[in-house]
Amino acid sequence: MRLERWGILMVVLLCATGCGRLGFEIMAVDTDDDPGSDGDADGDGDGDGDADGDSDSDADVDGDTDTDSDADSDADSDADSDTDSDADSDADSDTDGDTDTQPQGVLFEDGFEDGLGNWGLLQVVGNAEAARTSTFAHTGTYSLYARTSAGEAAAFIDAEIPAVSQGDLYTRAYFYIASDHVTDTYTILSLFADVGNQPGIRIGFYDNGPLGIEVTFSGVQMNGGFSVPQGEWICAELHVLVHETNGSLDLSINSSTTLTVTGLNTLPGDGYDSFAVGIPSTGDSQSDAHAYVDDVVVSTLPIGCD
């Protein structure tokens, strides 16, 4: 506004020499620092804020256009950024989630770390005990502990799986049996049909022999040719080729096949739909039995040991 004041001074000085003669007209010049305080933003004196004098207020078009353009640009940029970020995040999350929590072929998997919510009921028969414990664990902190007293008894936990009536079925678990423990006659894993109401296949110790297999509905019972190490965790995997006449069984201990049976009926009822681990059964000659179980997996594909 200093220039406007100097303009007035110049006009006054000129008028001192004769404004009328020179034809000058003195006009009021707004020296207010706020050009909008008198309601006339454009300074043309008409109060319409319209610099071009046509009263359509299009003098602000450029300003509005720039503002809208910036806003649109920011909005587009934010939207694109958010969309891309969300899409990438969702895609990564979904991919990782599917890979980690649902491996191909797996029907059941649990290591007792998050309680027993994935299982059915803890079951005991006679003087027995079954519980989640932190005394021993193959991985993590927890495992299942099963104990039975002398004579016929049971201590186990079961779970259901989608029924398998043909093809391959693999069951793997880690077991710990104390070094001073007598393994006379008791089972450590059973596959069932009809949700446990119809026994299927068992793996266990029979008549002081090494770990073997019993097919309860076919009357087949065979011991393996490998004595199970005691006082350490062992990995036992049972493979069943489910077929009514031409089925087969393979038992592996620590990734080594110890027993194979072929050409038999391995299809009970409508197929296998449940299983149990711990000590599902004992013989009347068995003294006190103890076992720890961990890292149980049931799958339609080979599992293997860690």
Image (spheres, rainbow, N blue to C red):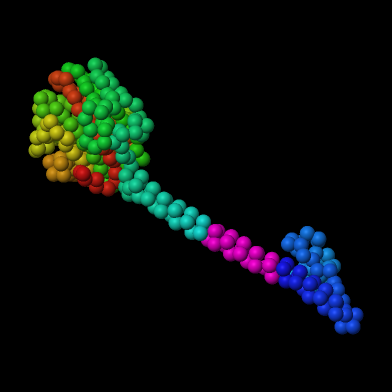
Please tell me which residue lies in front, 295 or 297.
Answer: 295
| Residue 37 visible in image | yes
**Image x and y of residue 172, in percent:** 23, 40
Please tell me which residue lies in front, 28 or 225.
Answer: 28
Please tell me which residue lies in front, 5 or 281.
Answer: 5
- In the picture, measured across the screen, residue 11 lies left or right of residue 201, that is right
Q: Which residues are magenta?
A: 62-80
Give the residue drawn at x 18%, y 26%.
Answer: 186
Quadrant, the N terminus: bottom right
Residue 149 colored in magenta in the image: no
* Quarter assignment of residue 252: top left
Give the residue drawn at x 35%, y 50%.
Answer: 99
The relative height of residue 42 versus residue 179 in the rendered view (above or below) is below
Residue 68 colored in magenta in the image: yes
**Image x and y of residue 193, in percent:** 31, 34
The relative height of residue 2 versus residue 92 in the rendered view (above or below) is below
Give the residue drawn at x 20%, y 43%.
Answer: 305
Q: Residue furthest right?
A: 20
- In the picture, measured across the screen, residue 18 lies left or right of residue 202, that is right
**Image x and y of residue 256, in percent:** 13, 44
Q: How many marks?
A: 0
